[in-house]
Amino acid sequence: MKRFFAVPALALATLAAIGCELTGPLSGLEGDYVLQTINGQTLPHTSTFGGGDFYTVRSYGMRVMRGNQWNYATSYSSSSNGVNVSLGYGKGTGTYTYTPPSNIELVGSEMRFTGTVSGDQLTLALDGDTWLFTRAPDTD
């Protein structure tokens, strides 16, 4: 499973480029969130696996929208068989379920986050790792 991380300016700029349709009532969760840490370590975060290969998340941002939709943008690098194979950007969409007062599940095509909401923070689990996101200030 690939892992992702967030650098605020890049992640938010990419989210803005994705665009989104905002319909339905506000839930209080809506906004842009930027990954701050994985397992308490700041970005970039590198995971190693299988013979020394690595996956580094340089940035990861998500936009939680009305209508139980969310999207993400990420910047990463990786290796295969010890050779650097990619330095890239990814984006995707998904749906979320919020169960008050704090439980949230976000499902996308390549991942499933589960966790909690507390104020402007999302604490999410993915593949045994803990990802901490903070909501970016509104710019309106």
Image: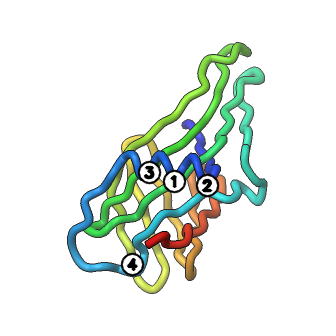
Circle 1 crowding by C-alpha within 10 Å: few under 14, some 14–19, many from 20: many
Image-based side of 59 in relation to 43, left or right: left
Circle 4 crowding by C-alpha within 10 Å: few under 14, some 14–19, many from 20: few
Residue 99 is labelled as 4
In the rendered structure, are the residues bearing label 4 and label 1 in contact, judged by CB atoms less than 8 Å apart? no
Task: State the residue at coordinates (21%, 74%).
Answer: 24
Examine the rendered structure and indicate whether residue 77 appears above or below residue 12: above
Q: Secondary structure at mark 2?
A: helix
The spot of residue 12 in percent (x, y) is 51, 53
Closest to the observer: 13 or 1? 13
In the rendered structure, are the residues bearing label 3 and label 1 in contact, judged by CB atoms less than 8 Å apart? yes
Occupied quadrant, residue 25:
bottom left
Q: Secondary structure at mark 3?
A: helix
Identify the mark nearer the N-term, 2 or 3. 2
Would you name the residue on which mark 3 appears? 15
Would you name the residue on which mark 1 appears? 12
The spot of residue 7 in percent (x, y) is 64, 50
